Amino acid sequence: VQLQASGGGLVQAGGSLRLSCAASLRTFSAYSMGWFRQAPGKEREFVAAIAPTWTGDRLYYSDSVKGRFTISRDDVKNTVYLQMNSLKPEDTAVYYCAASNKNWDLHRKRQYDDWGQGTLVTVSS
């Protein structure tokens, strides 16, 4: 399984970015997809997740990004997106996408079997 994240970059506070993660999964629609991030010197933390399509695309967000970030998926393109608006300097991190064959406790790293390489998001003040 390959997960290729892209879309990171440098943006000013208040700006927006959209991250993409293309997955080489034969049955992409059956997987939960998540986004995590890791800031320098900190542990990797949950950002957002979307459950498989057959569950009704249930969405989950961390409190720190709720209302600003939106996760979505395109099962035709085998891609998951993270639309990030109203970015803050504290959103600066390497963002990782991950795939899981489970659809519960999606905020936990241990639920995910496959991880992408990460894309760097830097928000300047």
Image (spheres, rainbow, N blue to C red):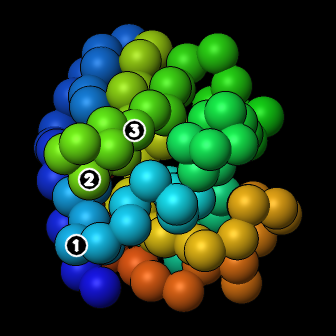
Residue type indicated by callout 1: Ser
Of the numbered discs 1 and 3, the one sitting upstream in the chain is 1
Residue type indicated by callout 3: Arg
Estimate the x, y position of residue 15 in percent, counting from the top left: 30, 16
Q: Which mark is residue 24?
A: 1
Q: Is residue 5 visible?
A: no
Q: In this image, 46 relative to 17: left or right?
A: right
Q: In this image, 61 relative to 78: left or right?
A: right
Pointer 2 local density, CA inside 10 Å: few below 14, some 14–19, many at least 20: some
Query: Residue beneath label 2, please?
Result: 78
Of the numbered discs 1 and 2, the one sitting upstream in the chain is 1
Of the numbered discs 2 and 3, the one sitting upstream in the chain is 3
Tell me how far mark 1 sits from mark 3, CA to CA: 14 Å
Marks 1/2 in contact by CB < 8 Å: the verdict is yes
Question: Does 29 sit above or below residue 90?
Answer: below
Describe the element under mark 1 as helix, strand or loop.
loop
Estimate the x, y position of residue 27 in percent, counting from the top left: 38, 67
Query: Residue beneath label 3, please?
Result: 73
Q: In the picture, residue 93 is in which quadrant?
A: bottom left
Residue type indicated by callout 2: Asn
